[in-house]
């Protein structure tokens, strides 16, 4: 992926930096991000849209990976930003991200979060439900401001890894249901809300989608809905946001189609639907997360204990695990790995990579073929850039690893490794009935 290669020492190099040197400097576990690869993904989405001739907006779904430097990178690339919490919004504002390019998502935004977003004057709210619709109108009225909104609707299509299946609305906690006409009511209420400007609708069908068929299906349902609403409520959408979910290649088994092909098919189906229904072409918004950062991230670990159970399995333990990458334990997600300090070797063995948490399920990779491993070797797990650091936790009071951006032979820490002091920062100690901060 990206700028990764094997250097003259036989070590894994990313962004012109030898990973063995990075480990000496920053320790393990360590998240490495190939900055140019993130930039190139941002550009691919924009270039793909430029070829379609459609008006568009690409918003980075920052739940995949967020920190101040990442927000600054996204800003430099000119993308918009999707945030889903006060915490992401706060970080984006601290990063100096232009508020007008921020979209706010989530199925239970609190009044405090909405107020924070209104005060920051963010670009648009993606309203999820009736509760939020009423709350947002109320808070906007209090401040005497007009607020741009999209309504999140559930088209009844849910993408699964390779295929898509129809799901009843009761299966989703997100959005206004189209089938039961909740979505029609939501549009009506939005149009009647004096402080809300309804720009259009949003739908997100799922994540790690490999083929455009799910999008094609969803978009035709959305366009049928919009066409109906145009006749019933005299509302024409200016914006159609089709969400994120573009798949990436974690292992050899994964075969996602390219960003260009995905955008091309989305664009064709929208053009076809609009032409058929004589509907004015809306501006198309998307919200990729994983596909922007997933492949750019690599996690480096130090190998410690090994346990060989004759004719059953060899466990190789690393100094991280489900605390820095919960995806294998949570979803059974698969990853590929290599030994960063001797990538190539004639002799290999099949081992299973275990994390260091006190939990049997804390396995990062089952049965992976690696050069013969020894203690002290550095294991590099690739494609950990999305939902790795962002879902990291302190189980067993492990410290969250540092995050390092690499580019053109230079490495810079963008998130420091947590310290033991960080771990007890919020603990309150009571001595003789008084609390000491
Ligand atoms: N837009 C909305 C409304 C979303 O809910 C999501 C992801 C995205 C965009 C970005 O999707 P992406 O392009 O990253 O697939 N933790 C899971 C993924 C959860 C995705 C949640 N929503 C994982 O590790 O696979």
Image: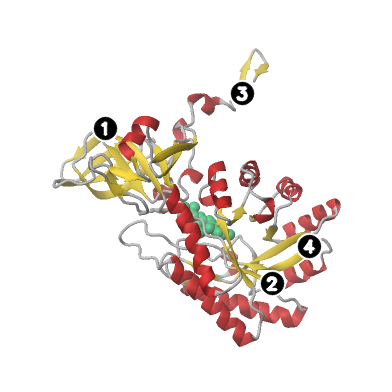
Q: Residue furthest top?
A: 432
Residue at label 2?
Answer: 238
The residue carrying mark 1 has its beta carbon less than 8 Å from ligand 1: no
CB-based contact (under 8 Å), mark 3 and mark 4: no
Q: Tell me the element at label 4.
A: strand
Q: Tell me the element at label 2.
A: loop
Q: Nearer the viewer, mark 1 or mark 2?
A: 2
The quadrant holding residue 424 is top right
Reply above or below: 18 against 36: above
Rounded to the nearest angstrom, the CA distance separating label 1 from label 2 is: 57 Å
Q: Which mark is residue 376?
A: 1
Mark 2: few/some/many CA within 10 Å (<14, 14-19, 20+)? some
Rounded to the nearest angstrom, the CA distance separating label 1 from label 3 is: 37 Å
The quadrant holding residue 314 is top left
Q: Nearer the viewer, mark 3 or mark 4?
A: 4
The residue carrying mark 3 has its beta carbon less than 8 Å from ligand 1: no
If you read the primary sequence from the N terminus, does the residue marked by circle 3 or circle 4 appear first?
4
Q: Residue drawn 14% across and 47% down?
A: 346
Q: Position of residue 297 (x, y in %)?
A: 41, 48
Residue at label 3?
Answer: 428
Q: Position of residue 256 (x, y in %)?
A: 39, 65
Q: Tell me the element at label 1.
A: loop
Q: Residue drawn 63% across and 75% down?
A: 179
């Amino acid at each position: 992926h990206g700028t990764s290669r094997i250097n003259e020492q036989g070590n894994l190099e990313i962004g012109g930096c030898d990973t063995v040197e990075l480990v000496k400097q920053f320790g393990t576990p360590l998240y490495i991000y190939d900055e140019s690869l993130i930039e190139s993904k941002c550009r691919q989405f924009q270039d793909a849209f430029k070829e379609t001739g459609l008006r568009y907006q690409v918003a980075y779904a920052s739940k995949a990976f967020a920190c101040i430097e990442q927000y600054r990178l996204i800003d430099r690339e000119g993308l918009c930003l999707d945030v889903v919490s006060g915490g992401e919004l706060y970080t984006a504002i601290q990063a100096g991200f232009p508020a007008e390019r921020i979209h706010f998502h989530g199925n239970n935004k609190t009044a405090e979060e909405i107020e924070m977003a209104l005060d920051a004057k963010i670009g648009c709210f993606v309203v999820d439900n009736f509760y939020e619709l009423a709350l947002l109108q109320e808070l906007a009225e209090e401040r005497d401001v007009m607020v741009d909104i999209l309504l999140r609707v559930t088209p009844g299509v849910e993408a699964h890894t390779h295929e898509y299946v129809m799901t009843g609305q009761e299966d989703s906690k997100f959005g206004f249901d189209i089938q039961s006409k909740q979505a029609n009511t939501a549009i009506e209420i939005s149009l009647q809300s004096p402080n809300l400007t309804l720009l259009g609708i949003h739908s997100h069908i799922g994540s790690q989608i490999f083929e455009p068929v799910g999008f094609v299906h969803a978009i035709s349902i959305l366009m049928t809905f919009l066409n109906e609403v145009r006749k019933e409520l005299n509302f024409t959408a200016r914006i159609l946001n089709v969400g994120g979910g573009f798949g990436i290649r974690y292992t050899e088994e994964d075969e996602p189609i390219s960003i260009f092909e995905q955008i091309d098919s989305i664009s064709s189906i929208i053009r076809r639907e609009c032409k058929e229904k004589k509907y004015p072409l809306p501006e198309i918004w998307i919200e990729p997360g994983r596909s922007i950062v997933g492949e750019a991230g690599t996690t480096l670990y130090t190998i410690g204990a090994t346990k060989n159970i004759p004719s059953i399995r060899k466990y190789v333990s690393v100094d991280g695990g489900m605390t820095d990458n919960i995806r294998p334990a949570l979803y059974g997600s698969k990853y590929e790995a290599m030994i960063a300090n001797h990538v190539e070797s004639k002799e290999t063995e099949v081992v299973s990579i275990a994390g260091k948490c006190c939990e049997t399920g804390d396995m990062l990779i089952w049965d992976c073929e690696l050069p013969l491993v020894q203690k002290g070797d550095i294991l590099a797990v690739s494609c950990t850039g999305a939902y790795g650091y962002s879902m990291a936790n302190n189980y067993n009071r492990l410290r969250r690893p540092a995050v390092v951006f690499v580019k053109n032979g230079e490495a810079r820490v963008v998130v420091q490794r947590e310290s033991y002091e960080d771990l007890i920062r919020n603990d309150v100690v009571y001595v003789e009935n008084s609390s000491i901060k």
